[in-house]
Amino acid sequence: MATGKRRVIAQDPFGSVALVEYSAKPSLPIAVTVDTGIPRAQYRDAAAPDAQLHKTLSALLSDSYVHFINFSDDGQPLLFSVRSERDPGSFYLFDKKVGKAALLFSNKQDIEAEHMAERRPIRFRARDGLELAGYLTLPKNPNKTKMPMVLVPHGGPFGVRDEWYFDSDAQFLARRGYAVLQVNFRGSDGRGPGFLEAGYREWGGKIMNDLIDGVKWTTAQPQIDANRVCVVGASFVGYAALMLPVREPGMFKCSVGYFRPLRFAQQI
């Protein structure tokens, strides 16, 4: 503030900076995550005490992401959350004096994380060369058979994105044996203003191309059955579900566009 100068403390060439982890007062940034892929803490100063605490908690909960919500004014109790692609999330209060965490409450307590499906980050190039990212949720498949797939684009279409964290629709479908593809097409959030603006006036054009190219890339993978692909969704996705079979005849065996969001998670 004294000099009026600023410097970059975190950046990524592909995705926007997402979460920022702060220390106890004076609340300095100790780590950041990026909006694409599996969230991983990138530490500014890994030797800082609260960065060490974050690393320790993250190591104990290695399949999840630990987010520091807030410290008390004296820097002792810490409220933090833990969540993953299989776990909707829990909240803990950590006492730094005794080094113990107490569970406060969990989201969707009846969800059994061990029965939920893996969500894999994917990247591929659209037909015009633009690199895109998304997520492929894969059900447990002990027989190693080719799986049917459902494309579930996100709504918006602008300023919205799919994340790695627990997704009720994807897990509902995966529990019933479907692989689930979600593509952060141009216009999505998490890639900066240029990527968002690339989707302007492209609802029926390049955005549809991105989704089609995502399906082509995914159905080329050995575990996916290219002859059993469906698209489903509401709002903008209802539009996409009706437009995609027109744009790419023969790709989709079914298309479901609806108005009100289905409460898939209630039936898991």
Image: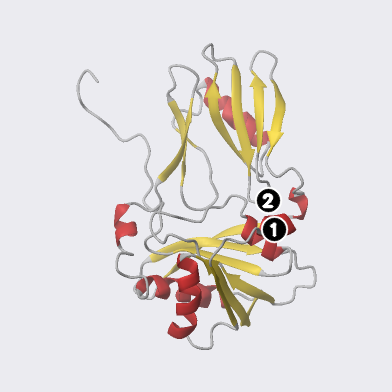
Residue named by callout 1: 117
The amino acid marked with disc number 2 is Arg
Is residue 189 toward the left or the right of residue 140 in the image?
A: left
Give the residue displayed 31% in from the left and 53% down from the top: 193
Q: Which of disc 2 and disc 1 is earlier in sequence?
A: 2
Is residue 36 toward the left or the right of residue 159 in the image?
A: right
Residue 129 image label:
none
Total residue callouts = 2
**x and y percent of residue 81 in the render?**
61, 34
Q: Is residue 72 above or below residue 151?
A: above
The residue closer to the viewer here, 241 or 37, is 241
**x and y percent of residue 51 in the render?**
53, 27
Q: Is residue 83 above or below residue 228?
A: above
**x and y percent of residue 211 in the render?**
46, 72
Mark 1 and mark 2: span between their CA atoms? 6 Å
The part of the image, by quadrant, that contains residue 208 is bottom left
Q: Is residue 221 above or below residue 25?
A: below
The amino acid marked with disc number 1 is Ala
Is residue 200 toward the left or the right of residue 32 in the image?
A: left
**x and y percent of residue 87 in the render?**
68, 46
Residue 268 seen in the current view:
no
Outermost residue, right direction?
A: 143
Q: Are marks 1 and 2 in contact (CB under 8 Å)?
A: yes
Graded by Cα atoms within 10 Å as few (under 14), some (14 to 19) or many (20 or more), the crowding at tag 2 reads: many
Residue named by callout 2: 86
